[in-house]
């Protein structure tokens, strides 16, 4: 209904009051929607243009810690209590000069790289006589040495092996030949070094096959992207899958694992274009530094049956995010205990702060971040302890902070006078829904507080996914899962991925494909990323 001045003048007092109140309710609803939209815009702008970090600056007068890790809520008082009469600093300690580069640092950096010493640029006898009057009037000092790091472009050669063949000259025809070399893909031009270079380019440096094809052409070698893709899939299926299966059998014997998943598009899997598929990743927990394992698995869906089947036989803790499929896994397999990621809980409040007008000490989301930071800080103080000691100290020092955090959340949520933004309320609800699983890390000293290691592991795949957009076939998706698994496992053991795959692809064709279980385990253990018998070149320089 349209209201003009004349209509308003005809209304009595009660009608005017009713009209104003009605409009007030509508304005509140509109303001609420406007605030929500404004928050979304601020968060989107922050994600697009702001710094990509969840680290928040600590407000003055908030949470701080003493040298023993004790929690304080008032930083100035805490610092004064620690040292009532501090020593006055001198001008030398206040104005510190920039430290120089340690002597010999460059030599240390270059010690493992071959050195080609060029002919010395000497001073001729004529020049020395002209300068000093006689050769007896001078002596040679230490040479000035100038170094440059020279890049050597990739080179090519054809490796040709002749196998002798003999035929009988009398009687029934007979043939005998020398030992045939154990090469990759019989009848193919691909060598272990070439395939290792292709794998390193695509799965480590995220280069599309087409770009590698052009790079090869510039060096006079014409290898099509179709050839590279075919070689890679066949090598993954025939050889590398053996190591993948061995690592999978070993993975499920550990008692702390971490998991995550990400979207991938497969263009030719029998479904309509654009249909989402998923690459799942599983890795050993942070306590297994001597034999780290990272495994990817491709699946068409995000169904909880996939991790249930992959982890068949696993008995222990699985660290993951809040995806409901993991909770289903917990119900179907009681032997698997779910531990929720605290970084995801903190991220909800970080988004709320980024979406708000001005973060301040009184902001509920900011306070939540500080309280979670206190839990992290207390737990980080225990990192050098054994798993058993860490579990005991978590119960004594960390659990009270977790209890206090959830108690504070309930108080904030129940306060009728406290106006919470939508993002803050989402953060509170998330923590309430995941509380049981957020507390799981307190039960075992080997369980980490968050799943950041797994998110870091899956990041190379997501970067590669942007560069080559999609995987063409189901076999390509499965091959990618196998190769990414070995790449990330090799990186976790500090290996040079190119030389490791070169060695692996030169050794696996020599091994019998069908062997007994014990013999297969011995072979794979000898070739595993953490094996002590790998060639020295497989390790990164300067490790």
Image (spheres, rainbow, N blue to C red):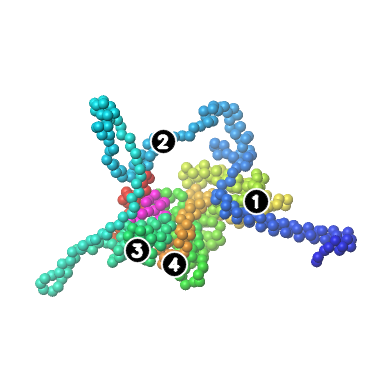
Number of the label disc, if any, that sits on residue 356: 1
Residue occupying the point 47% across, 42% down: 384
Looking at the image, tell me whether mark 2 or mark 3 is earlier in sequence order: 2
Name which quarter of the figure residue 119 lies in: top left
* Place of residue 89 in the rendered image (x, y in percent of width and height, measured from the top left): 55, 28
Front label number (2 vs 3): 3
Numbered label attached to residue 223:
3
On-image quarter of the C terminus: top left
Q: Is residue 495 magenta?
A: yes
Instruction: Tell me the quadrant of the picture where the N terminus can be found.
Output: bottom right
Evaluate if marks 4 and 2 touch, with contact meaning CB atoms under 8 Å apart. no
Q: Sequence-wise, which precedes: disc 4 or disc 2?
A: 2
Lateral position of residue 313 relative to residue 437, left or right: left
Contact, CB < 8 Å: mark 4 with mark 3? no
Q: How packed is label 2: few (under 14 Cα within 10 Å), some, or many (20 or more)?
A: few
Of badges 1 and 3, the one in the foreground is: 3
């Amino acid at each position: 209904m349209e209201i003009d001045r004349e209509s308003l003048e005809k209304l009595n007092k009660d009608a005017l009051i009713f009209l104003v109140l009605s409009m007030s309710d509508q304005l509140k609803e509109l303001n609420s929607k406007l605030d929500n939209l404004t928050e979304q815009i601020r968060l989107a702008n922050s994600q697009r243009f702001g710094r990509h970090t969840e680290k928040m600056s600590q407000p003055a007068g908030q949470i701080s810690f003493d040298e023993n890790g004790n929690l304080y809520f008032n930083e100035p008082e805490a610092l004064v209590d620690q040292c009532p009469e501090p020593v006055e600093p001198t001008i030398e300690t206040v104005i510190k000069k920039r430290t120089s580069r340690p002597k010999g640092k460059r030599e240390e950096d270059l010690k493992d790289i071959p050195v080609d010493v060029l002919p010395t640029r000497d001073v001729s006898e004529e020049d020395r006589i002209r300068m000093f009057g006689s050769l007896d009037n001078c002596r040679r000092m230490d040479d000035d040495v100038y170094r440059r790091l020279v890049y050597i472009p990739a080179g090519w050669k054809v490796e040709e092996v002749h196998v002798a063949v003999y035929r009988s000259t009398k009687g029934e025809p007979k043939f005998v030949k020398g030992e045939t070399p154990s090469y990759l893909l019989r009848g193919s031009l691909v060598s272990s070094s070439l395939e290792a270079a292709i794998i390193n380019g695509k799965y480590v440096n995220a280069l599309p096959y087409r770009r590698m094809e052009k790079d090869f052409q510039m060096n006079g070698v014409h290898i099509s992207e179709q050839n590279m893709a075919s070689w890679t899939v066949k090598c993954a299926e025939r050889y590398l899958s053996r190591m993948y299966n061995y690592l999978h059998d070993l993975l499920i014997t550990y008692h702390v694992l971490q998991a995550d998943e990400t979207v991938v598009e497969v263009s030719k899997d029998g479904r309509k274009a654009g249909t989402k598929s998923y690459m799942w990743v599983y890795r050993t927990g942070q306590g297994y530094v001597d034999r780290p394992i990272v495994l990817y698995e491709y699946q068409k869906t995000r169904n909880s049956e996939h991790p249930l089947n992959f982890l068949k036989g696993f008995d222990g803790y699985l660290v993951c995010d809040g995806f409901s499929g993991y909770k289903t896994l917990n119900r179907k397999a009681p032997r698997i205990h779910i531990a929720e990621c605290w970084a995801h809980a903190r991220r909800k409040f970080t988004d709320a702060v980024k979406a708000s007008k001005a973060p301040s000490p009184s902001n509920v989301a900011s306070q939540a971040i500080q309280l979670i930071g206190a839990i992290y800080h207390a737990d980080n103080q225990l990192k050098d302890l054994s798993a058993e000691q860490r579990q005991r100290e978590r119960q004594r020092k960390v659990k009270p902070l977790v209890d206090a955090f959830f108690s504070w959340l309930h108080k904030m949520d129940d306060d009728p006078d406290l106006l919470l933004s939508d993002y803050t309320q989402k953060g509170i609800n998330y923590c309430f829904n995941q509380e049981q699983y957020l507390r799981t890390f307190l039960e075992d000293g080997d369980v980490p507080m968050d799943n950041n290691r797994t998110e870091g592991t899956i990041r190379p795949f997501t970067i590669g996914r942007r560069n080559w957009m999609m995987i063409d076939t189901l076999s390509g998706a499965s091959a990618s899962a196998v190769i990414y698994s070995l790449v990330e496992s090799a990186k976790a053991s500090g290996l040079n991925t190119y030389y490791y795959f070169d060695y692996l692809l030169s050794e696996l064709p020599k091994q019998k494909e069908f062997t007994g279980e014990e013999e297969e385990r011995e072979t794979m253990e000898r070739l595993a990323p953490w094996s002590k018998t790998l060639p020295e070149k497989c390790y990164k320089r300067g490790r």
